[in-house]
Structures are given as C-alpha cells and as structure tokens.
Image (cartoon, grey):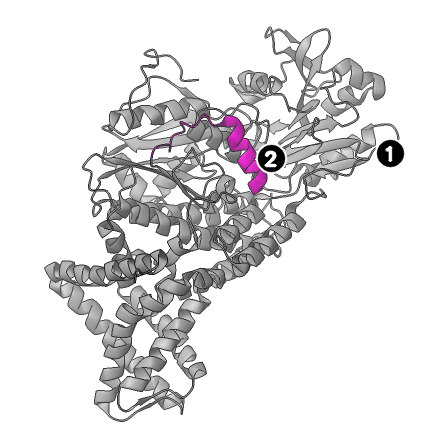
Amino acid sequence: MRIPGPITRATTDLRVFWRANLRVADAWRQDRSRLVRYVLVTWIVDGLALALAAWALEPVRFHGILSLVGAVVGISAANALVRPIVLRFVVRYAVLTLGLLSLAINGLMIALVATVVPGFEVGDFGVAFGLSLYLAVVNMGIGLVLDLDWSDSWYRQVVLEAYRRQPQGSTASAPGLLVVQVDGLAEPILRFAIRTGNAPTMAAWVRGGHHRLARWDVLAPSQTSASQAGILHGSNDGIPAFRWYEKGSGRLMVSNRPADAAEIERRVSSGNGLLAGGGTSISNLVSGDATRSALTTSTLRAPSGVRSRDFFGFFADPSTVFRTFVLVGMEVVRETIEARQQRLRGVVPRIGRSWPYPLLRAAACVVLRDLSVGVVLEEMYRGTPVIYVDLVGYDEIAHHSGPERPEALDAIAEVDRQIGILARAAALTSRPYRIVVLSDHGQSQGATFRQRYGQSLDALVRDLMAGEPAVLAATGSVEGWGHVNTVMTQLAGGKGRGASFARERVQKRAAEDHGEGLDAAGRPHPRTDVVVAASGNLANVYFTAVHDRLTWEAIDAAHPGLVEALASHPGVGLVMLRSAAHGPLVLGSVGHAAPGIHHLDTGEVEGDDPLAPYGQLAAISLRRLDAMQHVGDLVVVSSYYVDTGEVAAFEELVGSHGGIGGPQTEAFVMYPADLAEPAGPIVGAPALHRLLAGWLVELGLREPDGAREPDGAPLT
C-alpha cells in the first residue's frame, strides 16, 4: 500500500531532524569541552531544578537519586527524539497559540518520561505542564549564565543543520548576498552610534576595512513603501506617500495594508526584481519578486510562500518560545519605565506613549525580530542565493522616543547584535555570504504640528475653508499595527478553520485600529469633501468633488485665499500645487507677508526661495511628486527649523519621515570592501537598486544586462 504524500514528507522531515541531532553532536565533538560543558551543566541544573520542584510540590516525587538522573536524561532524550514527531504534525497550532502548545507538548514529554522511568512521578498533566514552564525558565537562565545566544541553542543548531542537509539545500560555492535593512536609521546617526560604541559589529567592519560606509540620498516621499519599491523592484513611480487618496476609485491607499501592498507591488513589478530567481523576502512591505516570502506584507494573501510549518524551527525549542514571551514582557516594562523617565526629566519634544504602544513596540522589537532572524538563518542554511530582510525595531522606537535618544541608540545596539548573529552563521553555511547593511530612509526629530500650534493640519484646513467641510484626517500612526497584522497573518497562514479564524480576527482588528474611518474597500464616507493624508511632515490634500487634480486657479475660485493663508502659516514651510498659467509651483512665506514662489519647471524664484532650507535635492523630490498621478491637489510640507534641525510632523510622532528636511532623507549603505564602489552619488532608491543588481552580477548571481553607469555621474 502506498503511503500518502504528506505522511511521507513528514517521515522524511523527522528522519532528517533525527540525523541532524547526531551530526550536531558529532560536530561538537571537535570542541569536546564545549559539548561537555553544555550537556553537564544543563543536566546538573535541570536535576537540581527537578529536585527543588519535588521538594516544593507534593505530586512530583523521586524515589532515589537514580530516578532523578533517569528523569533528567529521559526528558532530554524525549525532547530531542520524540517531541519533534508530535510537534511536526501540530506545528500549525503551535504557531497559532504563539508557542503555548509547544510548552504543552514539552509537558506531555515529561508525563511520558514519568510513565517509563521507575520512581519518577508527576501526578496529572497540569503538574507536568507546570514543570515544562519551570524548566523553560531554568534553561533560559542557563543560556544567560553560559552566554549562549538563542541562535546557538542545541535546538537551533539542530534545525539549521537539518536545513543544510535537506536535498534542496544548496552546495554552491558561489557567494550569496544577504541584505539587512535597518529601517529608519539615518547615515549620520549610524556614524554617531559607531563612535559611541552602540554598533560594535558594524564599527569593527568599517574600522577594519572589511566594509565601506556610504550615504545615499532619499527622494521624497522618504518612507518605506517608496524606498523598498525602488530598492527591490527598481521603480517607485506612482507612490506619492505612505498613504494617499485615489480620486478615480475613491480609495485611500495605505502601504502596510496587505491588499494595498499587493497592489503597489503589482504596479511597480516587472517580474525581474532584486530577489527574482530564487531569492527570499523577509519582513518587507514588497517582495522584490522573491521566490519565497515570509512576513512580507504584499504576499500575505498569496497562496504560495512561507507557511506555518516553515516556522517549525522557531517553535521547536520551548526555551526559545518562553524566552520570546519573557522578552516581550521585559520590553513592555522597559517602555513604561523609559516613557516615565522622559516625563519626569521634562524631555522635549516628546509624545504620549500610552497603551497599546508598549505592546506594538514589543511586537516589532522582539517577536518580529526573532522570527525574521530565525527565518534568515534557515534560508542561509538552505543556500538561498539572495536574502533581503527588514529589521524594524529601531524605526518603531525612534518614532516615539526620538531618533537620537538613549532608547533609540539601544535599539541600534540590538540591531547590531542581530547582524553579528547572522555574520557568525555565514561562516558555517555551505554557501559563503556577503552581507550588505542599508537603510530605507532616516528620521527627523521635532515637536509635532499639533503640539506647536495647538491644532492639527486637517483642523487648520477646515478653519481656512469657508463653510463646514467634511475632512477625513488620515494622520494617525499606522506602522505599529501593520507589524502586528503582518506577524499574526503570516503565523496564521495555511489551511483549516483555525488559521482562517485567526486571519479574519487579526485583519478585522487591524482595520478597526488604523482604518482611518474607511469602509471595507478602503473608501471614506461618500460625503467627505477633503482628504488630508499625512506621511511624517508631508501631507497630500485632496478635494474630492473633482476627479482631476485641481489647479491653483480652481482652488482659489472655490476657496478664495486658502492657498496663500496655508502657505503663510508659521508651521507650513511650503505648499506645492499646479497653476494653469505657470505649471508646478512651490509657495512659502519664509517669514514674510508675501510668499516666495519657486517655479519647478524653470527653476525661477520670485522673492525668497521656499526650498532653500530643505537642501539641494528638494526641487528634484518635488518635481517627482508633481509628476505622479495620485499626488494631492496640494502638497504641504512642514517648516524646517534650521536652528535645531527639526521638523513638525503632521502625525503625532516625535521622530518622523516621509517628507523632506533633516536626516530623514539621509540613508546609508554599508557594503563589503571588495565589491565595486558606486560610480558617483547615489540619489534615489532606483539608483540603489541598480547598485545592488550590479553586485549580483559581480557575484555571479545574475546575468549582466549590458547597462552601465558613466564614471563619476550621479546615480539617479
């Protein structure tokens, strides 16, 4: 009789897993002291812990020292050899319960050992589960005492060895490319972190000459969906902000909603993205045409890609799962303490950091980080040729605490530690990996527009317009809930009622929390007159009554003096719009009663140039935005306060990005010194895409297309 395919695959997986246990033990024999220390210390501590449990809990009993030794050895053997069988078949549910089922299975193994080891008793399953939780705490403590990173645990090493030995694993000697994106980290802040010792791994690379550090300039909108579309697909045309309104469909696009991210990728993808032909996308907004995607927003609804079972490696180790739970709790407590310290010290600018932000921070900085790094490790051991992962923890913290504050610098140190983990793993994989570290944009600090002037931008627009317009304010912070939605939707991937129910609940909650008052199709109320969609200190303003983009003349006819009054507000640095007579214009008061005017088509300036405070690339950025189909009737950028280098975000975030002004447009790329240097300044995400694609050609991972940048010319 033929065994069904799923059972055959499961049997094969388990056989590989068991053999991996033996191979890891064999490899560790080369460092006998390490193996002996790990095993003996673990058994001794576990034995003492079980003896203490027997003393404290009456149902737990040992009849002699031999029964205690037998229990310790038996539990270790059951977890290594039997537990994977059970977990392999129920891993989907272990994922859906965020690892609680993994602890329950560990309890089942303890109960099983109690039935076969003479003199060892645990009472009922509830006691066994309690022992499972207790031993997970103990083993996490062992790891801290022995200074073992979670990626170095026995279970993690077994899983990685299993991936390396699987038939589809690559044995190619050609180097692979691992690209680590540090979301939101500006180039000057990274250099500061290197000087202060907050990035020791990257500092050693740069100081030792192994890597070079270069700046690349981000053109507006300086935010993740535009930057990643440019970096991964080579095009970010048509993305005027993190969220924008499309008059034709009446829909508000939000980059981190799965349906909208998929639509963004459909529009920019040529099918030949940076990760096409075998690459893997991890924790990104768009996939770069990757063959495999994990925790990637644009592919969450796709039938292919990473499934729940692909997180087997993460959930296989009960101490790893428990470690994540503990770190989540610690992150919530840490955030509460740090927010309180800011208030007590009177640190300004600052914003409220109340619930649920502590949970969102923990999701981004612990759960998403550990899952992402775990998948990267597994992909490296598979021999995946190109891997691109986005680590979002720094960006999340910098938004709420400030990009240069102590907690943000600590977040850089944690990112640097994760990069060190990946670098150590790269020395053990069958395919040698070159590691490139880059950012998609920076962040600029400042008190928010509401804090400075007592009202939000949408309220200001409403006040300046005649009558009582219905204004939709798409100005809330949405990135944090996007991370939660991505994690839960991905972990609930697969078939079955449980997965479907989890996905529905997560998506419903996400829509409630950052739906901006929209219906299920992403459309505002049909009587909405104005939509104000903010991305940091840039906002697109749409008048919904007319499907075409309104000119200055048409806006002035409907709302006399609105544009001039808006441009003259002290918190508004500039307003971009189109004139029927003069083409695209930028207006700004620059402290004067009469606004200065910059003609984008010709570069001619009347009065004081409103673009002067924003740098040499401001005109290029705004010309790109003006050419986009779905740009606002008005594009508003906050003032740039030169004395402090700050901006005034239209969202309630102390660290912001999306517009221009300050380090939000100053990103970095750190690359191995033996790769070709950029031919000139890197301006815009598509230019960075071409640089990365050139390195793929250099490494033998892609065929050359014959295109070449002229020497010394800016990459734009």
Name which residue type carries label 1: Glu
- In which quadrant of the rendered image does the C terminus lie? top left
Q: Write the residue at 74% across / 18% down.
A: 550
- Does residue 262 belong to the magenta stretch? yes
Name which residue type carries label 2: Gly
Judged left or right of residue 568, residue 57 is left
Q: Nearer the viewer, residue 101 or 134?
A: 101
Disc 1 is placed on an element classified as loop
Looking at the rendering, the stretch of residues picked out in magenta corresponds to 257-277
Q: Residues within 10 Å of mark 1 (few under 14, many from 20)?
A: few
Residue at mark 2: 536
Q: Nearer the viewer, residue 291 or 1?
A: 1
Percent of width and height locating residue 36: 16, 69
Q: Write the residue at 22% across / 28% down.
A: 674
Q: How many marks?
A: 2
Farthest-out residue, front: 1
Percent of width and height locating residue 432: 22, 39
> Going from the N terminus, do you reach mark 2 or mark 1 first?
1
Disc 2 is placed on an element classified as loop
Residue at mark 1: 468
Q: Quadrant of residue 544?
A: top right
Q: Quadrant of residue 162?
A: bottom left
For marks 2 and 1, give the CA distance: 26 Å
**Vertical comparison of 514 with 69: above or below:** above
Judged left or right of residue 513, residue 269 is left
Farthest-out residue, right: 467
Q: Write the residue at 32% across / 64% down.
A: 144
